[in-house]
Amino acid sequence: MTTKELGIRAAEETIRTLREALIAAGLNLPSLGLDSASCARDVPAPLVDLGRCDVETARRLAEVIGAGGPSGERRTQ
């Protein structure tokens, strides 16, 4: 397996992990995926395309992030 393929596989795994975390938080980003143009380079630089979502999903995502997760516990820095 090439370095490029390994980079793309790692990005795909990250997307799967993110999708699972979003689902656990009750959120769905249907367009979440790997940006294919960013993978076309000889040296891989995969980008995650978070896609488009409606305003309600964006609001709920902001709430989950602001609260530190679905449990509602605020994170301290």
Image (cartoon, rainbow, N blue to C red):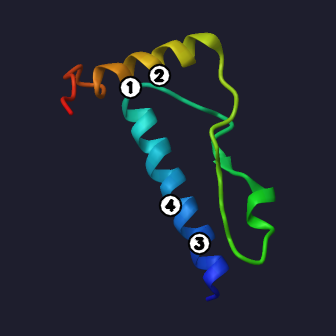
Which three-letter amino acid code belongs to the residue tagged 1?
Ile
Residue closer to the observer: 23 or 38: 38
Q: Which residue is mark 3?
A: 7
Residue at 21% over, 33% down: 77
| x and y, in percent, of residue 71 in the image | 23, 24
Residue visible at 71% across and 76% down?
Answer: 43
Task: Determine the CA span between mark 1 and mark 4.
Answer: 21 Å
Please tell me which of labels 4 and 2 falls first in the chain: 4
Q: Amino acid at mark 3?
A: Gly
Q: Amino acid at mark 4?
A: Glu
Instruction: Say if mark 2 contacts mark 1, CB within 8 Å.
Output: yes
Q: CB of mark 3 within 8 Å of CB of mark 2?
A: no
Secondary element at tag 3 = helix
In x, y percent, where is residue 16?
Answer: 50, 52
Asked if labels 3 and 1 touch by Cβ distance under 8 angstroms, the answer is: no
**N-terminal label among 1 and 4:** 4
Q: Nearer the viewer, residue 20 or 62?
A: 62
Q: Which residue is mark 1?
A: 65
Q: Nearer the viewer, mark 1 or mark 4?
A: 1
C-alpha gap between disc 1 and disc 3: 27 Å
Viewer-nearest residue: 56 or 24 = 56
First in sequence: mark 1 or mark 3? 3
The residue indicated by pointer 4 is 13
* The quadrant where residue 4 appears: bottom right
Question: Callout 4: few (<14), some (14-19), or many (20+) C-alpha neighbours within 10 Å?
Answer: few
Camera-near label (4 vs 3) is: 3
Left or right of 39? Residue 64 is left
Q: Which residue lies at the image location 30% right of the left edge and 25% below the top edge?
A: 70
Give the residue pinned by disc 2.
Answer: 61
Q: In this picture, is 13 found above or below 48?
A: below
Q: Is residue 68 above or below residue 3?
A: above
**Cα gap from disc 3 to disc 2, whole angstroms:** 27 Å
